[in-house]
Amino acid sequence: MKWIAAGLMILNVAVYLTIGGQTGRSQEERVPARPVVNEQAMLLLSEIPETASAVSVQPQDDSDPTPVRTSGIPGDSPDFPDTGTESPEQSVQTDLSDLPSVDDQDTQKPERMYTDEKLPASCFRIGPFNSEDSLEQASAWMADNRITHTPISGDSREFKAIRVFAGPFPDRTAVERYVRELEVKKIQLKARNQALEYYVYGNPQTGFRVSFGYFNQEKLATRYREDLQMLGIQAELATEYETMGPLYWMETSVTGDIVDLLKSRQWADEKIGIAPIDC
């Protein structure tokens, strides 16, 4: 019996040692390595999802506002900024969206282009023109300078005037002798800061006369004749009627430099003037 018990004990020990050795070898045994796979290439091709284990975020410096990421793959450089998961096409689209569109550019015009900088217009009446020919010449000049205008004609008028004169003289010799006497008096008056104006009119058939003045009021004509008589010049008064017209004018509305152009214009007749009127 002792031999049997001893044999069973030895058998149990052998079995125990055998089982324990196999367990130790199984724990020390390593799992076979997987085939080498280019994980970075698969991430770029979107064949596998990007996991948190593949990316590690480094601590950021407060002075650097640009986030930086590094890949867990050996050899990846940490110098490139994190662009997220946007593709290059999305990045280009985002940059183009920041640019102003065609409509935006139309609305971004300077304010001065929207302000109506209209200069105030000035209206003038030009004339009088004694004939239609002189009016047509002036109208042609206005058209050449692109100045719009409106021709206006007035009816003929009869004016009453009082002329202060000397004469009549029968011939030219007599009137020339009288004019030489007037020249002497004119020099004397000039020394006293006074003036004497006159001119000769008439013809051999009706006689020559010397005109000293032309007045529309008889009272003024009489006073002037008395002043001449005090200077030793005999003069007479005569009522005359003069028909004027028809006369012609032009009315225009201009702005800016055109006003100066009109005022500096030398018209054919000295009587033609430019006068402002209400627009």
Image (tube, helix red, strand yellow):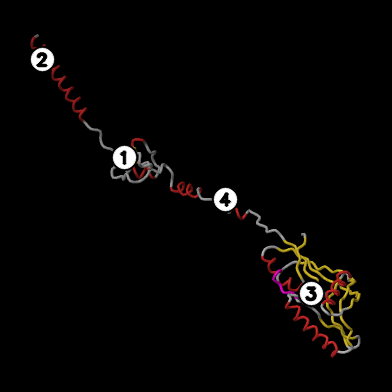
Q: Tell us which disc is closer to us: 4 or 2.
A: 4
Q: Tell us which disc is closer to us: 4 or 3.
A: 3
Q: Is residue 74 above or below residue 236?
A: above
Kindly report the distance in space between the C-alpha atoms of the residues bearing marks 4 and 1: 45 Å
Q: Check disc 1 and report its element: helix, strand or loop.
A: loop
Mark number displayed over residue 104: 4
Q: Check disc 4 and report its element: helix, strand or loop.
A: helix
User: Viewer-proximal residue, 26 or 186?
Assistant: 186
Q: Quadrant of residue 30?
A: top left
Q: Residue at x 76, y 66 (%)?
A: 275
Dominant secondary-structure state across the stretch colored magenta: loop
Q: Residues within 10 Å of mark 1 (few under 14, many from 20)?
A: some
What residue is disc 2 on?
7
Badge 4 or badge 1: first in the primary sequence: 1
Left or right of 134: which side holds 56? left
Left or right of 192: which side holds 13? left
Does residue 54 appear in the picture of this structure?
no
Q: Quadrant of the N terminus?
A: top left
Badge 1 or badge 2: first in the primary sequence: 2
Residue 192: where, in percent of width, then height?
A: 74, 76
Badge 4 or badge 3: first in the primary sequence: 4
Labels in figure, total: 4
